Image: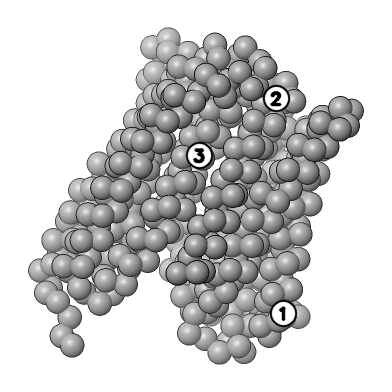
Amino acid sequence: MHRQLINLAVRGLSQACRLLLLLTLARFLLPEELGMFGLVFAIVNYGLMIAGLDLYAFANRKIVDASPEQRRHILENQVTVYCVAYAVILPTGCLLVLNGLLSWKLYAISSLLLVAEHLSYEVYRVLNAIGRPLEAVLEFFIRAAAWVPPLLLIFILVPALQTLETVFALWLLGTSLSVVFGLFVLAGQGLRITRPGRDLQWIKTGLAIALPYIIGTLALRGMFTADRFLVEEIGGLALLGAYTFYVGIAVTMVGLLESAVFSFIYPRLVEKANRRDMVAFSQYYRSLALQTLAGTGGLIAMIIWLAPYLMNISGHTIYAENIGLLHMTLIAFGMFCLGMVPHYGLFALRADKSIMFSHLFGILAFLLGALFFSQNNKGVYAVPYAMITGFTVILIAKIALFTHKYSAFKATGPAHV
């Protein structure tokens, strides 16, 4: 219980710092600069998903019960896969420059951030897998939040440093320090990596198992990346800055639900599914659904109430003038949050392919929706409308697939003890 409270407190503080970062950028940077930050953020987050190939879905399950020597073997093989991924992804990113989407300077910054963020994510996952949750949450805090208060202080005390370069520098510093901290903890557990792995059979097996995960993840994250480019294309960088501000607020809602609801209930769902305890599984699933529904509705109402005050803090009229865009974005992310209920149900039942197909349906609906709404003169609102369409399709697909999978789960009966 003591560790859970610390975990929740650190995650809550991290979400507060993320909101502080958003308000700091909106206050001290031009909307166009916030728009460029949004593009880089989306590129880095999509790139790290490609770099990781969701191999952790296979590796971390193996790490849990492995000996120290076996754990080193697993991590060394992961390093090999990631090095190959970097060798492919980073040169391919030059296409963003050649197509005029990024400058060479921003490409270099994005590449450094991508590698640092990805390594930090993987170290965080390994720390959780080997039973070091407190160290993992501290690593997460260093990466996501610890550098934000110093950034605000620098912006206040040194106006000349109120630039995107300062933001990227501190972001990279915080992420790099989190990697160093995580590697130090792993070394203390006897997990010092000295060479890349050469177990091709392990790598092939891992990638084959991770394939449904990576396809589903890239489809879902594709929506969170394509939306930025579509807004920039339709409305320009200034409007993208406003959209980035609104999405940041909506993501805070998702983070709060993850910290307060999802992270506590979904492990119990997995446990009950593994034990085939249908009664307890149903109870936890119902609790997850009710808490998510209440939390999503309450947070959306609170954000709408606070929105005028948040707009005033920014000091730029563009944020208040397009507040309707915030409302549509909140609806889209509200549908996303509701979709996490059947998502965790499917995850507990190990229905990985069902999750993958749901996300593929979703991005197809998003792209078709963006095309339809943009051709019907919806302007920049075409993007949140398309997001609502995509997340609604994902929600419906996951509910239908979960209902089917759960019926089959019940039909097999409880486990024989």
Instruction: Name the spot of residue 277 as percent of width and height, x first.
Output: 20, 73
Q: What quarter of the picture does the C terminus occupy?
A: bottom left
Task: Give whichever of 146, 343 is nearer the camera.
Answer: 146
Residue 251: give its label.
3
- Residue 340's place in the image compared with 226, above or below, is below
Residue 187: give its label.
1
Task: Give whichever of 17, 329 is nearer the camera.
Answer: 17
Q: Is residue 144 visible?
A: yes
Mark 3 and mark 1 lie on one chain; the one further toward the N terminus is 1
SS for callout 3: helix
Badge 3 amino acid: Val
Q: Are the residues tagged 2 and 3 within 8 Å (C-beta)? A: no
SS for callout 2: helix
Badge 1 amino acid: Ala
Instruction: Name the spot of residue 413 as percent of width and height, x first.
Output: 11, 74
Work out how far the residue at label 3 is from the one at label 1, CA to CA, in angstroms: 34 Å
Mark 2 and mark 3 lie on one chain; the one further toward the N terminus is 2
Please give the name of the residue rendered at 58% of the width and 56% of the height, measured from the top-left corner: 10
SS for callout 1: helix
Please give the name of the residue rendered at 56% of the width and 66% of the height, measured from the top-left corner: 125
Badge 2 amino acid: Arg
Quarter residue 198 falls in: bottom right
Quarter residue 37 falls in: top right
Please give the name of the residue rendered at 34% of the width and 30% of the height, measured from the top-left corner: 389
Instruction: Name the spot of residue 249 as percent of width and height, x first.
Output: 53, 33
In this figure, which residue is indicated by the disc labeled 2? 27
Please give the name of the residue rendered at 74% of the width and 25% of the height, measured from the top-left corner: 29
Q: Nearer the viewer, mark 2 or mark 1?
A: 2
Mark 2 and mark 1 lie on one chain; the one further toward the N terminus is 2
**Left or right for 342, reference 7:** left
Instruction: Name the spot of residue 301 as percent of width and height, x first.
Output: 38, 29
